[in-house]
Image (tube, helix red, strand yellow):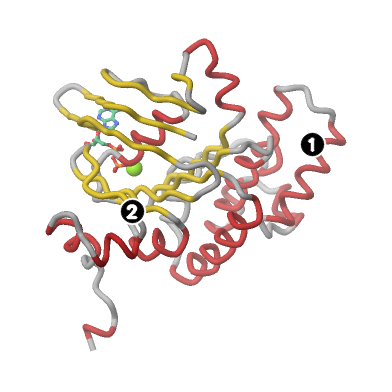
Amino acid sequence: MFELAGVRKRYAATTALDGVDLSIARGATTALIGPSGAGKSTVLRMLIGLEWPDAGEVRFDGEPLQRARLPEQRRRIGYVIQEGGLFPHMSAADNAALLARTLGWPRARIEARLDELARLCRLPADALRRYPAELSGGQRQRVGLVRALMLDPPVLLLDEPLGALDPIIRHELQAQMRELFATLHKTVVMVTHDVAEAAYLADTLVLLRRGRIVQQGSARALHDAPATPFVREFLHAQRSLEECL
Ligand code: ADP
Ligand code: MG
């Protein structure tokens, strides 16, 4: 579905991506993991054309991304940015419907789609009428998902969608997202720094460090056959309760 070939990106003195070759399979869930600053969000922004490589190429369905076709590209991709990115002065429903309205969808179609997605994402109907500040963190994430799914895009990009949630809500949303991904058969690329979340939700893990891919494969492969000592270190960096008792 996506290919990155020799992609490099610098911001002034910082090398965000240092020669990334990556192929992302259609219909599967891929998790980008790695330490903060590794380049995970930059990869997502490249896929949707919010950033352009200094060198190398990004392909979607075999064709290089073209600036002239970006609006079309954006409609084929649902994107949930880090921290949700809802407009605070608009109700949840207006946030979710923004793009559909811009495309001229009739009101009845928008209402029907919002109803359908609120049910799918388990958002109470009255929550859609509220402003982001009047929603819980979990509800805001659900609204972000509803917004991303509004146009029924084949691709979903999720940047730390569960990063800011308390452990119980996070646990619950992880289970619901897994069910959602299995039901919708979309190509999902998600960023998380939680290894267990990546292993639970994704078919393939891509571990990045300092703008390079260290290893790509199933959670099992990274666990059983780490390509470098860093892979093992990253996989085991989270302390479990058991080891503290
Ligand atoms: P991650 O999502 O893995 O935490 P990012 O992809 O956001 O990392 O960033 C990779 C590197 O590029 C970091 O060092 C970050 O500070 C830098 N970076 C990202 N975006 C910008 C920007 N717009 N301007 C300057 N530096 C940036
Ligand atoms: Mg990031």
Q: Position of residue 207 (x, y in %)?
A: 28, 50
Amino acid type assigned to the residue bearing label 1 in the image: Ile
Residue 75 lies in what quarter of the image? top right
SS class, disc 1: helix
Q: Residues within 10 Å of mark 2 (few under 14, many from 20)?
A: some
Residue 217's tag is 2
19, 101: nearer the viewer = 19
List the residue tagged with mark 1: 110
Q: Is 169 on the left or on the right of 105, as rendered?
A: left
From this viewpoint, which residue is outermost toward the top? 68
Q: Is 195 on the left or on the right of 177, as rendered?
A: left
Nearer to us of marks 1 and 2 is: 2
The quadrant where ligand 1 appears is: top left
Q: Is mark 1 within 8 Å of ligand 2?
A: no
Residue drawn at x 84%, y 35% is: 109
Amino acid type assigned to the residue bearing label 2 in the image: Gly
Q: Position of residue 1 (x, y in %)?
A: 49, 35
Q: Is mark 2 within 8 Å of ligand 1?
A: no
Residue drawn at x 29%, y 34% is: 21
From this viewpoint, which residue is outermost toward the bottom? 245
Q: Is 182 on the left or on the right of 161, as rendered?
A: right
Residue drawn at x 66%, y 44% is: 92
SS class, disc 2: strand
> Looking at the picture, does residue 171 appear above or below residue 163?
below
239, 73: nearer the viewer = 73
Q: CA gap, disc 1 to disc 2? A: 39 Å
Residue 5 lies in what quarter of the image? top left
Q: Position of residue 184 (x, y in %)?
A: 65, 50
Q: Is 41 on the left or on the right of 156, as rendered?
A: left
The mark that comes first in sequence, 1 or 2, is 1
